[in-house]
Image (cartoon, rainbow, N blue to C red):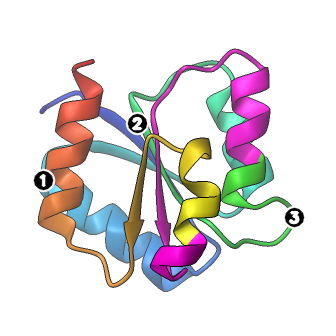
Amino acid sequence: MPGTRVLIVDDDKLTLNTLKDLLKRCGFEVETAEDGMEMFYKSVPGDYDVIVTDMNMPNLSGAGAAQLLTKAGCATPIICITGLSKDQIQDIRSKFRVVLQKPLNVSLLGRIIRKLAVH
């Protein structure tokens, strides 16, 4: 979906840049952040259609940033990408619109972003 603005958040620069390149090839406008605090500050204005975040990061986790954004009134859908087990995911599922396990299926991620961006 051309014009869909996506913020990708991950402290691992290789993952961040790889996701950025792959999602740009899918036609998304992509910006990045390297931790939950940067995610929060970039997202508060509501400039993104979808946020894709890692769970475990320094300074502020993906779940912590999602909670702060919700309290600030930000309604942007947030997708969490995590290496947590299925049992551990149950504990964080309520903080995110979608939770995906690593290794990531980029085609599935693209479909989910498109679906969330139109709602």
Q: Which residue is mark 3?
A: 59
| Residue 42 x, y percent position in the rendering | 66, 36
Q: Report if residue 63 lies within the magenta region.
A: no
Q: Is residue 24 left or right of residue 58?
A: left
Q: List the single residue furthest toward the right.
A: 59
Q: Do the CB atoms of the residues marked 3 and 1 lie less than 8 Å apart? A: no
Tag 1 secondary structure: loop
Most foreground residue, 48 or 102: 102
Residue at left 28%, top 66%? 21
Q: Amino acid at mark 1?
A: Cys
Q: Amino acid at mark 2?
A: Val
Give the image quarter of residue 107: bottom left
Q: Residues within 10 Å of mark 1 (few under 14, many from 20)?
A: some
Q: Do the CB atoms of the residues marked 3 and 2 lie less than 8 Å apart? A: no
| Residue 29 x, y percent position in the rendering | 30, 40
Q: Which residues are magenta?
A: 65-88
| Residue 48 x, y percent position in the rendering | 46, 29
